[in-house]
Image (cartoon, coloured by chain):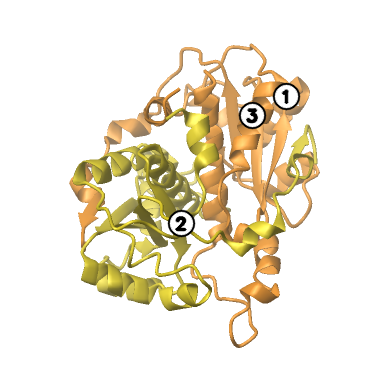
Chain colours: A yellow, B orange
Amino acid sequence: MEFEETVLNRRMVRNFTPEPVPEEHVRRILDLAMHSPSAGFSQGCAYIVVRDALRRREVGKIQGEVDYAAGGFGEFISKAPLIIVPCVSEEIYHDRYREPDKLQDDGKEIQWPVPYWYFDVGAASMVVLLAAVNLGYAAAFAGTFDPIALRNFLGIPEKFHPVGTISIGKPAKDKRSPSLKRGRRPFDQVVHFEKW
Amino acid sequence: MEFEETVLNRRMVRNFTPEPVPEEHVRRILDLAMHSPSAGFSQGCAYIVVRDALRRREVGKIQGEVDYAAGGFGEFISKAPLIIVPCVSEEIYHDRYREPDKLQDDGKEIQWPVPYWYFDVGAASMVVLLAAVNLGYAAAFAGTFDPIALRNFLGIPEKFHPVGTISIGKPAKDKRSPSLKRGRRPFDQVVHFEKW
């Protein structure tokens, strides 16, 4: 699909047909995600792929899917044929910026005014969402309120933080997020030329 | 350009020809960025477009461009015909999640185990980088060490945090980042099936 079409067609879809996502597509989506940038080429992101129905059920439970379902969205985590859990390790960034080529003149690690590990995992997750759309799927990201439960259930090492779940599958009739009623902010409020 | 080609062609390029980026392209790039997702459709991102040569010089100075130039990259901020400064407001997210439809059952705002505002501005910035490549440009993101100086110079309101600069222009012969010598982490170390 054309790049701009992919971006404009993407929206959070929270209902899927049960049709499985073939391994080849899972790999293509994640290969592309691995081509997203990272500070100092730290490559601090990792992904867990969950397709087993019982395991999806458990991930849906941890993600508080019941509350989404009560809001009319349905069980869009456990019922998606594919769940990808993006994770990021802050520690890998610190390790990278303690290597000789990244140390400051005073021999110390840089200060981090922005937690760029979250910025980078956001960029990588965006590629996952778009890559799914490009292959004819729909996707929905759900943030997590319980990263520790996700970590425990999925065996994620201490140093990695799971940031949520991306549900992927062929789109079925869905309920649009009521948040969309807020309307899109106008261009001129969001973009400023030369100065704010 | 095809979506996958756009992703695979994107890399950080730190040298550009002086050819200006027309207003129409600036608007297309940022229109697409505005189609990236945000928690609760908070839309907490904003962008400053800097094209004026003197102002680019100042932004380059704030971004410590001299150090990059000493490393052999050249002045890839001030010499890019277009700089986009992505900003995000944490406050807008808190305001959004204090609206009635987002409050918890106990009437309180959710806890934020992940600063999703940085995740979202990372996703939006990724769209900017890819949209530039799709239009035949190259781009480079540089994080910031001095968000306060950027804020002061660009007149950014207190509640918005500038996260860096995206330099955009037609690609010229560039020096590749030495970080790339680290090599890409292999797929099987990054992706885990069913559990880590």
The residue indicated by pointer 2 is A173
The residue indicated by pointer 1 is B51
Question: Which label was assigned to residue B127?
Answer: none
Observer able to see residue A63:
yes
Q: Is disc 3 placed on a helix, strand or loop?
A: helix
Q: Residue at x 64, y 35 (%)?
A: B30
Image check: A73 left or right of A24?
A: right
Is B152 or A150 nearer to us in this picture?
A: A150
Callout 3: chain: B
Amino acid at dot 1:
Arg
Is A182 or B33 nearer to us in this picture?
A: A182
Amino acid at dot 3:
Arg
The residue indicated by pointer 3 is B28
Image check: B93 left or right of A18?
A: right
* Quadrant of the rendering where the N terminus of chain B is positioned: top left
Q: Mark 3 or mark 2: which is in front?
A: 2
